Image: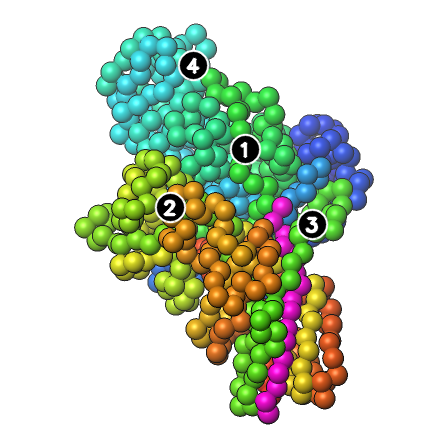
Amino acid sequence: MPFKSPSNTAVIQPVALATGPNFGSMDNLGRIRTSRHQNIYEADFEYGTQPMRWENFIVGTGASITHQPGQGGCRMRVSTANNDLCVRQTRPYHRYQPGKTMVMSTAVNLGAAQTNQRQRVGFFDDGNGVFFEQGDPIATATTNTQTGSVTSGNNILTGLTSTFGFHYGMQVTGNNISTSTPTFVTHVANSTAVVLSQAATGTSVANTVSFNIPANPYGMFVVVRSDTQSALGTSIGVNGGLPTDTRYPVSTWNGDAASIAKIDWSRIQMLWIEYAWYGAGLTRWGVVINGEWVVMHSIGSGNRAVGTLTQQGPWSRTGNLPVRYEQRNLGTTAAINDMFHYGVSVVVEGGSDEQRGFTYSYGSNTSSPQKTVNGANTRYPVLSVRPRPMATVEASGNATFNPSNSQSNTTALIINTANTSWTTNQFVGRHIYLPGLTSAGVTGGITGRITASNTTAFQFVDVITGLAIANTPGANQAYQVGLLNRGQLLPKSLFISANAAAVVELISSSPTSPVILTSPTWASLANTAYSLNTANGSAANVQQALISGSNNSGLGSNYSFAERDVSATGMSGGEVVFAFVSPSGGSGLQQIDLSYFFPLYNTVAGGTPDVLTVAVTTPGTTNIGVHIVAQEAMS
């Protein structure tokens, strides 16, 4: 794409050439932006919030998301209450393609910076990604003095009162803190410990240390979120676990200094973020001023060292990320805040190849290839398909909830004593899926993130809020442990045969109206249990994985990430997205092209994937058989 220099009357006048490193004239893989750039997703909000393509997640009676037709955007509002939360996230996780640069750009007005509040925009979810963040404003430089302990030759400072609000780049001084060159924070290890850029010169126990906090009047940060971080931060990207936000305040940004110094973040801004994943690619954050793509900050992960830390693993677990806007209260705030967002695009620099993935067929059992539908002028669900709620399943079984182990911010789940083959904290950071429980009024299943465990019990919190899950699982509650399914099913073809005329409708879930089936029996396409499930428990404890009886007839796709149901007796909800009349008189097989059909996704919180149902309405008795062929885009 061409770039032009700002006019002489511009408020911000970049001082370098447009081809310099502080400008976005090249993508993250060194290609000049004359290469093909292809939109893979775009949205504006002239007529609504686009509920089929975006999901809203709202917590708190004072929180709201409202379409602004007069501005062509959306307003996200939180009150002054602690834990108020608004999230708007794209339904698709945009599929990263190695060898390409992923770019998003959008216009936002973040509103006023306030203590205990965060506004975020970027490529991210609750586990991984990169984003701009507006956080606690700091009008003038200040000092935070605490007591801490560090041993000689060690670079981990422990015993602090709190690391809330700490971030990369804070200079540290104190007893036995090296002064040969400035010592700074390279990593916030946990709520009471930080990693320093240099080893201590001697042992210091409960002595005074001071953290110099530079001014940040707009509270602006760029952030890398990853659940591949190690627990103590002694290296970067090693063990995996709970999500870690590495925050870089505006004082540490390495982009165009003249532009950084003059931007007024209380105004509307056009922001852009781009990354190349590979595990070790470059990430950049920037703004567009007078048509010029100006770099605010960049981080390259290849051969990277930060103080005593070295990059040992990928900067995030995945390059498949959604676009997300978020406003969140971390405590009580001084005033209501409004955040506005407008149009957004996701572009692949270098062009996008056709979506990759394996193709599978889902349909009737070979033992009962057609289903008899009695005439009742009522929609009857002949076949339903959905992505599996969990893509990676590492443990499954039944459990009993013990309320006495419930804490203020966590939920404890006691596992059957027969399943004791895992080790303490083996699954910290993984998701736990509890099928059949209700979340936000939708029955399907809820998910949590495991924060601690021993050989018989998990503690977990809500994936998005980080708080205890309100629902109380009962005795013999089924569960799965692993990673949420963030892939997608892309329908390609529908094959149908019927011996009489019938109205055939394809009905798909939407975030506000999911398909609810009556008495479904969801089955994987595997003939036996998922191979990973039995590693930590007997096959008898595997939930939703064993296929038995007539369900195993002809289903031999062991590596499919989908489930299908042919047992439901009724349905409600959903959106009718396709319909036709089957020919009468048993005219044979029909093939319907679904290549333009939109994919099936999971929800923001996970656990309630989209359902696509083939529903039949007939005035008389009809024998009907259906198969859907879809591509499973898992990457």
Find residue 136 and report its horizontal and vertical position in percent. Answer: 40, 40
Find residue 187 and report its horizontal and vertical position in percent. Answer: 43, 27
Q: Is residue 51 above or below residue 587?
A: above
User: Mark number for residue 24?
Assistant: none
Secondary structure under tag 1 reads: loop
Q: Amino acid at mark 1?
A: Trp
| Residue at numbered disc 3 | 356
What is the C-alpha distance between the residues marked 3 and 1? 24 Å
> Left or right: where does residue 185 sit relative to residue 251?
left
User: Mark number for residue 198?
Assistant: 4
Q: Earlier in the sequence, mark 2 or mark 3?
A: 3
| Residue at numbered disc 1 | 315
Find residue 357 and report its horizontal and vertical position in percent. Answer: 67, 51
Q: Nearer the viewer, residue 11 or 214?
A: 214
| Residue at numbered disc 2 | 537
Q: Nearer the viewer, residue 589 or 207?
A: 589
Q: Does the magenta run of residues contain 430?
A: no
Q: Nearer the viewer, residue 302 or 339?
A: 302
Q: Are marks 1 and 4 in contact (CB under 8 Å)?
A: no
Q: Does the magenta run of residues contain 625?
A: yes
What is the C-alpha distance between the residues marked 2 and 3? 34 Å
Find residue 108 and report its horizontal and vertical position in percent. Answer: 56, 51
